Image (cartoon, coloured by chain):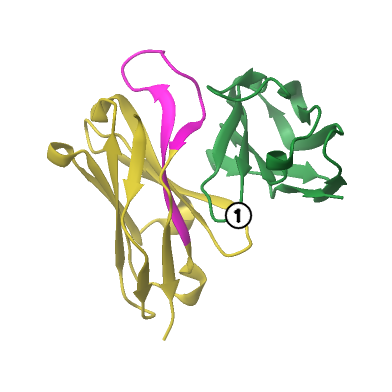
Chain colours: A yellow, B green
């Protein structure tokens, strides 16, 4: 079964960093790009960036440039998102989501087809 | 490209038909327009991709249509489990992935 399983909830102080993991199951890890998005309480969805698993190449939303780092460990089929210099407005649920268009060919389609369950990150003093 | 969804809240009864709108600030390819459903405490679920293609396992009471700047998600014969928040999403111009603000479909 294709699924993404994220790490558990985090509570951080302002100025700290958080690292969220996303482990993939049921498909070839390098076949699809992985994206990270977040959703503040009661708000909509915000795209943070993406990583290409076979190369490690990343693209970040301008809002997060210089503050976010996305990595992967191919040996354990796991993606990571680290966000630095946390502020109270970073309190949100963070999601990893697979982009359904394949990396190597034109298979699939252009949408987020598989989502992790979400990781709540609370920033509070 | 900004996506504007309307209405913000839609109050209907089970069995009724729901029509949700998503308008883009400039023309986008229908290939890159998707719809998601989100229930409280859950991750979004893909419903429609390419403006009109149902994702795997999505019932045929869900349909998508539209082109250019105007897109629609229609749910015929609402079921109790359909009451949720719906988001449209586009892929393309900078920023490359944007979502509408959502339409909350609530039970009347």
Task: Please state if B94 lies on the left or on the right of B101 as rendered.
Answer: left
Instruction: For the C terminus of chain A, give its image quadrant.
Output: bottom left
The correct choice, above or below, for A105 with respect to B102 in the image is above
Instruction: For the N terminus of chain A, give its image quadrant.
Output: top left
Q: Which chain letter matches label 1?
A: B
Residue B99 shows up from this direction: yes
As helix, strand or loop, the secondary structure at mark 1 comes to loop
Q: Residue furthest left?
A: A75
**Which one is nearer the viewer's eye here, B69 or B12?**
B12
Q: Where is residue A113 in the image (x, y as percent from the top left)?
A: 47, 31
x 43%, y 31%: residue: A99
**Which one is nearer the viewer's eye here, B108 or A14?**
B108
Task: Please state if B48 lies on the left or on the right of B62 as rendered.
Answer: left
Residue A102 painted magenta = yes
Quarter holding residue A94: bottom left
Q: Position of residue A91 (x, y in %)?
A: 48, 69
The correct choice, above or below, for B48 with respect to A9 in the image is above
Task: Please state if B35 lies on the left or on the right of A125 as rendered.
Answer: right
Region of the chain picked out in magenta, as a range: A93-114
For label 1, count other residues whose C-alpha is less than 10 Å away and answer few (under 14), some (14-19) or many (20+): few
x 81%, y 49%: residue: B107
Question: In this figure, which residue is indicated by the disc labeled 1?
Answer: B40
Q: Which residue lies furthest to the top in this view?
A: A106
Quarter holding residue B36: top right
The correct choice, above or below, for A56 with respect to A92 in the image is above
Task: Please state if A94 lies on the left or on the right of A27 as rendered.
Answer: right
x 52%, y 38%: residue: B96
Residue B64 painted magenta = no
Q: Where is residue A21 in the image (x, y as percent from the top left)?
A: 28, 52
Residue B1 shows up from this direction: no
């Amino acid at each position: 079964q294709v699924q993404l399983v994220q790490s558990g909830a985090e509570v951080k102080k302002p100025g700290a960093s958080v690292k969220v993991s996303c482990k993939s199951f049921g498909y070839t890890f390098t076949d699809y790009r992985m994206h990270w998005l977040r959703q503040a309480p009661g708000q909509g969805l915000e795209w943070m960036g993406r990583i290409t698993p076979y190369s490690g190449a990343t693209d970040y939303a301008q809002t997060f440039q210089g503050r976010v780092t996305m990595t992967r460990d191919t040996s354990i089929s796991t993606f990571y998102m680290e966000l630095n210099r946390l502020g109270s407005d970073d309190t949100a649920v963070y999601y990893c989501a697979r982009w359904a268009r394949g990396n190597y060919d034109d298979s699939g389609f252009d949408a987020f087809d598989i989502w992790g369950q979400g990781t709540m990150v609370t920033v509070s003093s | 490209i900004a996506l504007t969804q309307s209405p913000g809240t839609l109050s209907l009864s089970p069995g009724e038909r729901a029509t949700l709108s998503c308008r883009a600030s400039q023309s986008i390819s229908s290939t890159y327009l998707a719809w998601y459903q989100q229930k409280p405490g859950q991750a979004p679920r893909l419903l429609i991709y390419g403006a009109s293609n149902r994702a795997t396992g999505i019932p045929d009471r869900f349909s998508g249509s539209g082109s250019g700047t105007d897109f629609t998600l229609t749910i015929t014969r609402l079921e109790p489990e359909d009451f949720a928040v719906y988001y449209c999403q586009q892929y393309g111009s900078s920023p490359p992935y944007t979502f509408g603000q959502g339409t909350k479909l609530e039970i009347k």
